[in-house]
Amino acid sequence: MRTGRRSFLKQAGAILGLLLVSSGTGLVRPLAVLAESFPKPTKKDRCPVCGMFVYKYPHWMAGYVFTDGTKAFHCSPKCFFHNLFHLDKYHPGKTLDDLQMIWVTDYYTAKPVNARDPEMRFVAGSTLVGPMGWDVVPVKGQKCAKTLHRDYFGQEILKFGEVTEDHIQRARKGGGRVTK
């Protein structure tokens, strides 16, 4: 009797899953499409700030796509934000209004996430070291941000619009930690 119930549940689950995927109205398809929409760097793509090959650092990668289709890949959130604060230097003639897509890689899931997502948090002043040294670490959700903040002795949990050039300059100068 138990095997019959398990078999029925497996079949029902398979049918439901198939319906969700084929209908396009379920959760599976939109999530897959969203994950595929972030561009991936080639082996030739270099970070415009430091010149490192970006594909070597998939767990730290961040980037932009401009409205004209130009892509900028970064090896770390620190370079990503530095470029953002100095678009005129790295992308002459382009402004923040020209950004069509902007993403970072979530530290815990290693998946690209819209940097402007209201759930995204950036932990500044932690002891966590990325490919370019100390960094501002992106995580999705306040709970994850608090965990990273606690585990890596972070000093601030920030939303996208709260990350300042000062946070990035402190990280670029070797730590990002505020000393008292």
Image (tube, grey):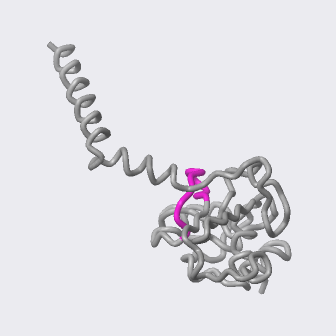
Q: Is residue 109 magenta?
A: yes
Question: Which residue is nearer to you in this view: 107 or 61?
Answer: 61
Judged left or right of residue 27, residue 80 is right
Range shown magenta? 105-115
Q: How many marks?
A: 0
Residue 46 in the figure: left or right of residue 31: right
Nearest to the observer: residue 69 or residue 23: 69
Q: Picture quarter containing residue 149? A: bottom right
Position above or below: 23 against 74? above
Residue at 61% x, 58% y: name it.
Answer: 105
Identify whether 51 is placed above or below 42.
below
Q: Which corner quadrant holds the N terminus?
A: top left
User: Where does residue 44 sit, x and y in percent of width and height?
Assistant: 80, 51
Quarter of the view holding residue 45: bottom right
Q: Quadrant of residue 125?
A: bottom right
Q: Is residue 34 left or right of residue 179?
A: left
Residue 109 image point, x, y percent: 55, 51
- Where is residue 64 drawn, in percent x and y? 63, 67
Pick out the residue farthest to the front: 68
Residue closer to the observer: 163 or 1 = 163
Magenta stretch containing residue 168, yes or no?
A: no
* Residue under the image location 29 percent in, 38 percent down: 22
Q: Residue at x 48, y 65 (%)?
A: 141
Image quarter (top left, top right, bottom left or bottom right) of the C terminus? bottom right
Q: Extreme left residue here?
A: 1
Q: Magenta span: helix, strand or loop, mainly?
A: loop
Residue 17 position, x and y percent, is 28, 35
Residue 136 falls left or right of residue 6: right
